[in-house]
Amino acid sequence: MHTCLFCTKQDKLYENDHAYVIKDAFPVSTGHLLIIPKRHIQDYFGTTKPEVAAIDQAIRWGKAYLDKHYEPDGYNIGINNGKAAGQTVFHLHIHLIPRYTGDVSDPTGGVRGVIPGKRTY
């Protein structure tokens, strides 16, 4: 039997038939959320169409929640698929990261910044 942090998570802000939303335990910005499928799957490429629809619904719920409670100026949505991509918990989870004007000196390139030196082009 495996032990998975996300298979036993209880502090849910929202849930639907296939996914739920929690606050990230190690947020990179105020309000950082995780969207997690209920079924234990390693990465995005193992999802079914109903799971993808439920994940999208949860992301949109998360955006509305963050807009209401934190009023961010933008968002990054990210998934780490595989160890080489930085995945450390091997249960799919999607980061919904609210962004605020001035939170970094130059946000140009956004998610391209995961590889140093590739953010600007």
Image (tube, rainbow, N blue to C red):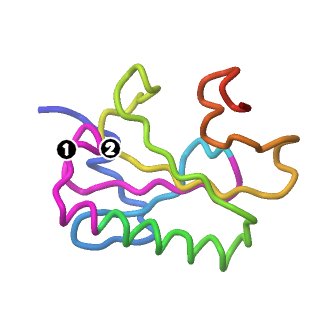
Q: Decide: is 92 above or below 50.
A: above
Percent x, y of residue 93: 38, 47
**Number of residues whose C-alpha sits closer than 10 Å to that of mark 1, classed few (under 14), some (14–19) or many (20 or more):** few
Percent x, y of residue 120: 73, 32
Q: Are the residues at dot 1 and dot 2 in contact (C-beta closer than 8 Å)?
A: yes
Q: Which of marks 1 and 2 is in front?
A: 1
Percent x, y of residue 73: 75, 65
Query: Which mark identifies residue 63?
Result: none
Quadrant including the N terminus: top left
Q: Is residue 43 one of those drawn in magenta?
A: yes
Side of 19 relative to 59 (left or right)? left
Percent x, y of residue 65: 57, 75
Side of 5 relative to 1 (left or right)? right
Q: Name the residue under label 1.
A: 46
The amino acid type found where label 2 is placed reads Leu
Query: Which mark identifies residue 92?
Result: 2
- Magenta stretch, residue numbers: 29-53
